[in-house]
Image (cartoon, helix red, strand yellow):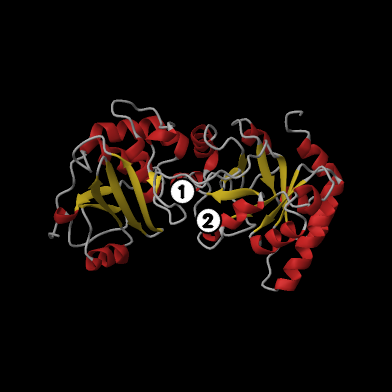
């Protein structure tokens, strides 16, 4: 690193064209990002700097970048792929993408990377887009095969896909509620899909809620997903012959933070459906290789029901996610801040389901709210 640094070669015209073409859709910060080859970076780093390294970086370098809140991308050639390790304030991601050139960080790659960072994409998502971008076009990438693969410990090898979870149909109105009382109320109103998101460290309390919810859903028109408490749900399901018609449980919903701890082999063996929340490109790519039953995409709008790892995505970004992922995981659910006023906009993207929380739980007239929301979905 030098005192002032020399910025990495960038196709400045392409960068500006991308911002002009897509900035209105995704939003763009006034502050432009800067890219530096590691050996040419300035001594004083800022939080809008991204450093590009050929090969691994030493731990002191990684620590220095982290202390500045900057981004470090280390790229190595492995056969016909670039293996990129992205270090950012949002963690470390390792991704593999087809090598289109002999240089890991050419001017076009840098232009797309910097434009995406300025359009508020996290570093790991900006890297995904930069690797997927087709040379010579300004069109937003939506060809899944061009996107990187996320190196994930649940996969025996990056190119070895596990058995798929059972597919889901379009899930329609998807109500996420805090306890079995709500499940009982909504099953009685024939809400197509319900999720029990009961937060407690009391194992016995969790078991009671799961069992009550399962008994309420059994034999009904509602599909019941259990959030997080997969061990209890799988045990109950197994005690009923791994048959959803007998157990009342249709599937499990997991967040990103749950994937590393969940026994995906046990979940597959149970025959239950699996849904997973995602909040951007890298997370979608990571989960797609696990072949879940559905993906939840968001948060689309601001929400107060949980702390989100990313800022609200907005409809433009959500639409891009749907275009990319629908051919791969057909059952998609829009999540985050969806209410009666916003639901038509979400459904207009072509997604087959949307999750709601407060639109039901805070409604003055719950049956009327449910009927209104259900009526916004296509018949059948």
Q: Position of residue 280 (x, y in %)?
A: 48, 46
Find disc 2 in the rendering and name its residue: 256
Report the front residue among 68 and 171: 171
- Tell me the quarter of the picture where residue 267 sits: bottom right
In this rendering, is residue 153 above or below 32? below
How crowded pointer 2 is (Cα within 10 Å; few <14, some 14-19, many 20+) is rated as some
Which percent across, then down, holds residue 357? 71, 51
Tags 2 and 1 in contact by the CB under 8 Å rule? Answer: yes
Q: Which mark is residue 60?
A: none
Q: Which residue is mark 1?
A: 286
The picture places residue 41, in percent across and down from the top left corner, at: 18, 55
Answer left or right for 17 relative to 337. left
> Residue 377's image quarter?
top right
Q: Relative to residue 173, is residue 141 depicted above or below?
A: above
Residue at image location 22% in from the left, 43% down from the top: 104
Q: Please determine whether, in this image, residue 235 is positioned above or below residue 282.
A: below
- Under circle 2, the secondary element is helix
């Amino acid at each position: 690193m030098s005192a002032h640094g020399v910025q990495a070669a960038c196709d400045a015209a392409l960068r500006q064209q991308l911002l002009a073409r897509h900035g209105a859709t995704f939003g763009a910060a006034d502050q432009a990002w800067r890219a530096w080859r590691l050996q040419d970076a300035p001594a004083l780093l800022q939080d809008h700097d991204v450093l590009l390294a050929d090969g691994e970086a030493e731990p002191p370098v990684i620590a220095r970048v982290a202390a500045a809140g900057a981004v470090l991308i280390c790229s190595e050639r492995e056969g016909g792929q670039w293996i990129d390790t992205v270090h950012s304030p949002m963690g470390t991601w390792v991704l593999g993408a087809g090598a289109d050139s002999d240089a890991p960080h050419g001017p076009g790659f840098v232009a797309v990377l910097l434009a995406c960072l300025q359009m508020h994409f996290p570093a790991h998502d900006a890297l995904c887009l930069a690797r997927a971008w087709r040379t010579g076009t300004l069109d937003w990438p939506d060809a899944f095969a061009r996107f990187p693969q996320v190196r994930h410990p649940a996969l025996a090898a990056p190119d070895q896909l596990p058995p798929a979870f059972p597919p889901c149909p379009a899930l329609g109105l998807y109500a996420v509620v805090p306890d079995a009382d709500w499940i009982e109320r909504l099953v009685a109103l024939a809400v197509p899909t319900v999720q029990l998101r009961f937060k407690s460290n009391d194992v016995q309390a969790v078991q009671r809620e799961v069992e009550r919810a399962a008994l309420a859903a059994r034999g009904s028109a509602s599909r019941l997903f259990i959030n997080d408490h997969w061990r209890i749900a799988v045990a109950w399901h197994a005690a009923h012959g791994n048959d959803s018609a007998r157990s009342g449980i249709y599937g499990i919903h997991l967040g990103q933070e749950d994937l590393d701890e969940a026994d995906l082999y046990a979940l597959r063996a149970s025959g239950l459906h699996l849904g997973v929340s995602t909040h951007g490109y890298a997370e979608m790519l990571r989960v797609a290789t696990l072949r879940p039953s559905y993906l939840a995409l968001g948060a689309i709008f601001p929400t107060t029901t949980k702390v989100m790892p990313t800022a609200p995505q907005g409809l433009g970004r959500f639409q891009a996610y749907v275009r990319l992922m629908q051919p791969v995981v057909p059952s998609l659910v829009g999540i985050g801040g969806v209410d009666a006023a916003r639901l038509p906009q979400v459904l207009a993207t072509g997604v087959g389901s949307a999750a709601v929380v407060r639109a039901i739980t805070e409604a003055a007239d719950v049956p009327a709210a449910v009927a209104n929301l259900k009526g916004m979905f296509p018949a059948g």
